[in-house]
Amino acid sequence: MFVPNPMIRYFKSTIFNILAVMNRMITQINNLTQSIGKIVSWFSILLIIIIIVDVFFRYSFNITTTATFEIEWHLFGLMFMLGAAWTLEQDKHVRVDLFYQSFGSKTKALINLFGTLLLLIPFCWVGMVESIDFVTHSYAQNETSPDPGGLPARYLIKATIPLGFALLLLQGISLILTSIKTLIR
């Protein structure tokens, strides 16, 4: 069967345009994820300093505060929630596998595609949607720490939950697009 040359050119240009859009989306999502991840990674140094000072004052002078303890877990939660997407982008997340490393790039892309579509995206969506009520309820109550001397505005740290899931969802979309690109090469 003969296919006219303009049809082939149109098909190739359409595929090229789709791939160009996919590349731009992947780059923009990855850049956002990397920027946030690099900023959040600096919080680990701040957390270490706070912990060292807390331990020093606790054991040297028997002084500690609830606010110090809470800021430590707030920083850890912030790093975990906002850094998860960067971890996925860098392919440094925990993966329990026996065979994945020995697979070729197309098989890995297929596993990543289906794993992201069937597991990661639904998990992020549920986590994001369900946590929004959690945050809005906390904000409406102007929730603070229940402990004397604790931190105010607990809704701020709770807001990192839907934000973290949204970033992870975006990075999942980037992984889907990257997997599709690998599969059609």
Image (cartoon, rainbow, N blue to C red):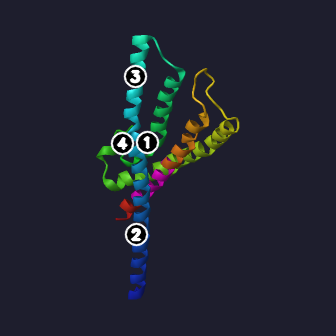
Q: Nearer the viewer, mark 1 or mark 2?
A: 1
- From what the image shows, is residue 59 above or below residue 91? above
Q: For mark 4, what is the residue? A: 92
Residue denoted by label 1: 83
User: The residue under label 1 is which amino acid type?
Assistant: Gly
- Which badge, 3 or 4, comes first in the chain's sequence? 3
Which mark is nearer the camera, 4 or 1? Answer: 1
In the rendered image, the vertical position of residue 65 relative to residue 2, given as above or below? above
Calculate the distance from the C-alpha at mark 3 to the C-alpha at mark 2.
50 Å
Is label 1 in a helix, a strand or a loop?
helix
Marks 4 and 1, Cα distance to the nearest angstrom? 11 Å
- Seen in the picture, residue 71 relative to 78 is either above or below; the reply is above
CA gap, disc 4 and disc 2: 27 Å
| Residue 45 x %, y % | 37, 33
Magenta-drawn stretch contains 67: no
Which quadrant, please, contains the C terminus?
bottom left
Image spot of residue 149 (x, y percent): 58, 22
Which residue is denoted by mark 3 in the rendering?
53
CA separation, marks 3 and 1?
Answer: 24 Å
Three-letter code, disc 4: Lys
Secondary structure, mark 3, is: helix
SS class, disc 4: loop
Q: Amino acid at mark 3?
A: Val
Give SS at disc 2: helix
Q: What residue range appears in magenta?
A: 168-179
- Do the CB atoms of the residues marked 4 and 1 lie less than 8 Å apart? no
3 or 1: tag closer to the N-terminus = 3
Q: Quadrant of residue 182?
A: bottom left
